[in-house]
Amino acid sequence: MSLFCLSFSPSAPSSVLDIKPAKVAQQLTLLEWERFSKIEPNDIPHNAYNLHAREPKATASEIHAVLDMSNKIKDWVIKSVLEEKDATKRARLIEHFISILDECRKQSNISSMYHLYTGLSSSPIKRLTQTWALVRHQKQYTLFACMDWFRPVLQSDRYEEVHRGLKAPCVPYLGFYLSNIGLRPQKTRCSDDEIVREIRALQGGSYKFDNDERIRNFICGRMTARVRYSEDVKIYMDKSCKLE
């Protein structure tokens, strides 16, 4: 079925609220996995050093695809919440995204989990105090619990605690590896070979979810290309300030 036909189908979702969180998380996981599984592990150390070079060269296309997807997930969360003028409906959207985030955790999709969180904790969303007051405490607790769960993923000194426990299939947070190699002192970071071996091991499995074109097309349709990050932030903050 074509995207054109799907967009006018009575069964096509009009909002992420029309789709169960587990279903959204499954399709996000498949979309992220398709990109992550194509990465050549040896490209990660090379691109990590390149990203922090004085004159960086083009990032490997497979890594760029993962980073681009991550940014679009964050933007999707922000735009979805800010498009809603009613505070109660914004609160329901936030709760729904928290549920999706938690489902991603269950599926070992750390990448989507992290970027859903960064969308929810971004300045344009975080400042909506009237909206957050309507978010149920149970959901807010889930959000904090998820943050505590993946906080060690961002800390190289707790590498043994979390990363060695990850099993394929898993979509890791690629930013950890890129920053761990490119920014941290040699004595505190994982070796390049260690990271290459881990990436290769995590690519060894596969997810058993079925593709749902209806949901995939909805998600991809909501993930529009960025103009420029600085411009997007200003636009989002302006919208946020007009709401509350």
Image (spheres, rainbow, N blue to C red):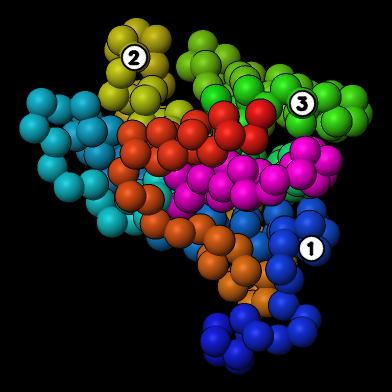
The quadrant of the rendering that contains the C terminus is top right
Name the spot of residue 214 as percent of width and height, x first: 68, 77
Residue 67 in the image, given as x and y percentages of width and height: 40, 46
**Alpha-carbon neighbours of circle 2 within 10 Å: few (<14), some, or many (≥20)?**
few
Q: Which residues are magenta?
A: 69-92
Question: What residue is pinned by disc 3?
Answer: 130
Q: Nearest the camera: 244 or 142?
A: 244
The reply to whether residue 69 is visible in this rendering is: yes
* Amino acid type indicated by mark 3: Gln
Label number found at residue 19: 1
Which numbered disc, 1 or 2, marks the residue closer to the eye? 1
* Residue 196 badge: none
| Magenta span dominant secondary structure | helix
Q: Residue shown at 45%/59% (left/top)?
A: 224
Residue that appears at 8% across and 32% down: 55
238 to 72, vertically: above or below:
above
User: Quick check: 32 left or right of 191?
Assistant: right
Residue 36 at x, y = what percent? Answer: 46, 53
Going from N to C along the chain, the mark reached first, 1 or 3, is 1
- The type of residue carrying mark 2 is Arg
Q: Which residue is mark 2?
A: 184
